[in-house]
Image (cartoon, rainbow, N blue to C red):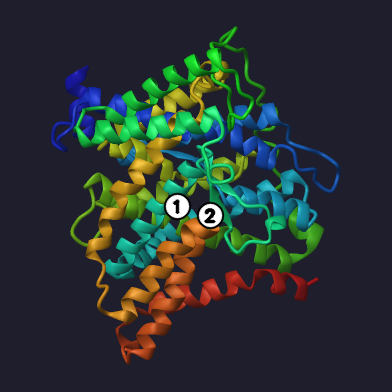
Amino acid sequence: MNDVLDRYFKISERGSSIGTEVRAGTVSFFAMAYIILLNPLIIGTVEDVNGTTLGIPQVAAATALIAGVVTIFFGALSNYPFAFATGLGINSLVAVTLVAGEGLTWPQAMGLVVIEGIIIVLLAVSGFRSAVFNAIPMSMKAAIGVGIGLFIAMIGFVDGGFVTRVPDAAMTTVPVGLGQGGSIASWPVFIFVIGLIICGGLVVRNVRGGLFIGIIATTAIALVVQALAPSEDWGMATPAIPDSLGGMPDLSIVGQVDLFGAFANIGIIATTLLVFALLLANFFDAMGTFTALGKASGLADENGVLPDMKKALVLEGFGAVAGGLGSVSSNTVFADSSAGVGDGAKTGLANITTGVLFLAAMFLTPLYEVVPIEAASPVLVIVGVMMAGQLTTIEWRKMEVAIPSFLTIVIMPFTYSIANGIGVGFIAYAVMMAFAGKAKQVHWIIWLVAALFLVFFSMEPLLSLVG
């Protein structure tokens, strides 16, 4: 059996082992598992025009199901260790803009997600997605990778409670602060700091499986701390030994999709603009994450391109279709799976492990909730450090390259959006190259994408114009 797995996934050929892949896949799951708790809070409580909500337990179960199925599907067919889950940012777009803002029902909104996913697949099959990927200059690819590193590090800091939002009432120009009032004022934040020290120390010592060991060790400390000094300030799950392993999941929202209802509800033009917004966000969110994970895993070539990139992009498109059909919003390659990549994942076997754990999470929610987000989020910070190493490959002395690269890097964490960072970077790159007298050196696809992002960033006034 081991020989079969080794040959199919090319484990030895890529310098890995079955144990490493399984362990790293487990690390990816723990780094991503928060989406099962977070996605229901984003889309499970919003009422549509009929006063209907999807429901928190229903969204949680369906989120785990679709993430598990798509992650296994992608790993088995692409042989890459890039796990999938509901895309953050895209789910907010669905809930806030499509449902709460435009008055779509939940089935209508998920129907648009399915349509957008089908378009993504067709663009990938045609080779257009690969052409866009290949047209991106190396410095911009590196900037995208660094930006995603800072983005997931920011997620880690915020989820761990180490960085918090400063209320507007504070009348300060500083949007975020350290801990609470500049201090580590709670046990959960203390656990995050301890976890960061443990994970960082293990990585510095080159301990195999250091990130996974760090999560387990930090969780054990969290359990002890919570028992001795109970706190209600934990981010998403309070560490405690569960009373039971769970029960049967409620998957009643799966398949509740209305493909064409939005067109009749709000009109063809408005619906088309919404599909375009979903398409652009998903298209470049996934492409940026592929770029970063490809370089971090060492599987990309010297130009930052993955072997069989077209195949991977086609498979990724099916994640959006599956997410819509599951009523959980578009599933896309998840930047947080870089935790597994950082722990040594190099093949699709890691994805199989992550996917199986997602499927098990449908039934064993209390068990995986033992791991608080404060114990898993330090891994994201450490991986962000690893991905920041690509800074050295950017041509900083050429300002026409440095300015768009810098904007790409900082916009991602500042706006909590990979797509926003790529969009601003592409627009800035085209404009700065034109100022440098090098407009002809900019690939026509970059000009096209920059123009599309200008439309994307003008979406609200455009929607207002069409009523």
Measured as percent of width and height from the top left, residue 33 is found at 50, 31
Q: Quadrant of residue 140?
A: bottom left
Residue 33 visible in this rendered orientation of the protein: no
Quarter of the image where the N terminus is located: top left
Residue 151, numbered circle: 1
Q: Quadrant of residue 437?
A: bottom left
Residue 416, numbered circle: 2
Rounded to the nearest angstrom, the CA distance separating label 1 from label 2 is: 7 Å
With respect to residue 243, does 266 lie above or below? below
Callout 1: 10 Å neighbours few (<14), some, many (20+)?
many
Callout 2: 10 Å neighbours few (<14), some, many (20+)?
some
Q: Do residues under tags 1 and 2 come within 8 Å of each other at their CB atoms? A: yes
Residue drawn at point x = 30 percent, y = 66 percent: 134
In this rendered view, identify the residue nearer to me: 184 or 191: 184
In this rendered view, identify the residue nearer to me: 118 or 235: 235
Q: Which amino acid lies under the numbered mark 2 shown in the image of this protein? A: Tyr
Q: Which amino acid lies under the numbered mark 1 shown in the image of this protein? A: Phe
With respect to residue 268, does 177 lie above or below? above
Measured as percent of width and height from the top left, residue 10 is found at 19, 34
With respect to residue 295, does 230 lie above or below? above
Q: Quadrant of residue 362?
A: top right
